[in-house]
Image (cartoon, grey):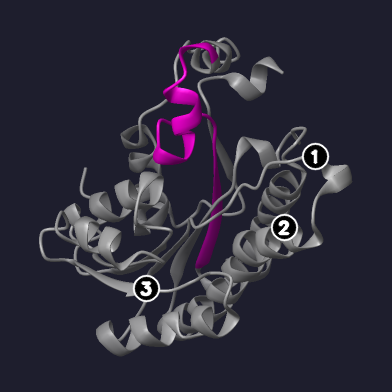
Amino acid sequence: MDLRLTGTVVLVTGASRGLGAAMAIALAREGAYVVATARSEDSLAEVAAQGEGRISTIAADMRDESSVRAIVPEVIGRHGRVDGLVNNAGIAPAGKFATQDPAVWTDALAVNVVAPMLLAQAAGVHMIEQGGGRIVNIASTTGLRGKPYLVPYSTSKGAVVRFTEALAAEWAAKNVQVNCIAPGAFVTDAQKAVTESPELHAKRIAKIPAGRMADPSELVPLACLLVSPLSSFTTGATFVVDGGESGKL
């Protein structure tokens, strides 16, 4: 199937590793011009090298508002337009809520909520002016069902789901689709503590009806479709990709 991504311009945040890197590379291979952003310039360069010449990079810290505000103007300056935005960057601080430093909350909300909002606002205004576009927010199953010791993360990812629904309703008539993906357990660098421990890995997969954790490649097709013009009547939805775990709870 031709996803009609050739020549489109897509911004992907948190693209230096894991799900973000997988989505950036896949979108480029589908013909999109991808601007990948994250903090690590070296890791971004490794991702760009796999993009068949269609991935450029911007080093940015999602906790720094001025840095975030500069991203969309830079994308438009390079390509003249922006057709898709994938808000993937996120942090998941763990700890006991009773003793958690408020700075942990400040960082989690800045990266997981405020940065996606600023990027969606800047990119969306441009999308409306050019006649349409698509925004994909990456939440988490933790944002659907809160988990202990991940209170800031659960809270922030829950906010992403509600943000998606509200913005989708506001911009539907302007031909800007806004959707959300809520991944479950994926084999990424962020999950090394689990995947490298036989005991923790066994406990984790015991909760998943599919009996395993997922590979990033299993989320990529959905992300590409939601960034594609083919998803023009799909908006305000949250797609759960978790091997049946949420349905089991």
Label 2: element kind: helix
Q: In which quarter of the image is residue 116?
A: bottom right
232 horizontally vs 161: left or right: left
Q: Is residue 63 above or below residue 77?
A: above
Label 1: element kind: loop
Residue projecting furthest to the left = 52
Q: What residue do we see at 40% from left, 37% from top?
A: 188
Q: Quadrant of residue 217?
A: top left
Quadrant position of the C terminus in the picture: top right
Q: Which of marks 2 and 3 is in front?
A: 2
Q: Is residue 37 above or below residue 100?
A: below
* Depth order, front residue of 228/36: 36
222 horizontally vs 142: left or right: left
* Depth order, front residue of 238/192: 192
Residue on which disc 2 sits? 104
The circle drawn on residue 59 is 3
Label 3: element kind: strand
Residue on which disc 1 sits? 96
Label 3 is placed on what type of residue?
Ala
Q: Quadrant of residue 228?
A: bottom left
Give the alpha-carbon distance from disc 2 to disc 1, as whole Å: 11 Å
Query: Magenta part of the protein: which range?
Result: 176-199
Does the magenta-highlighted stretch encompass residue 23? no
Residue 160: x and y, percent?
66, 55
Residue 3 seen from this side: no
Q: What residue do we see at 42% from left, 23% from top?
A: 196
Residue projecting furthest to the right = 98
* Depth order, front residue of 82/39: 39
First reached walking from the N terminus: tag 3 or tag 1: 3
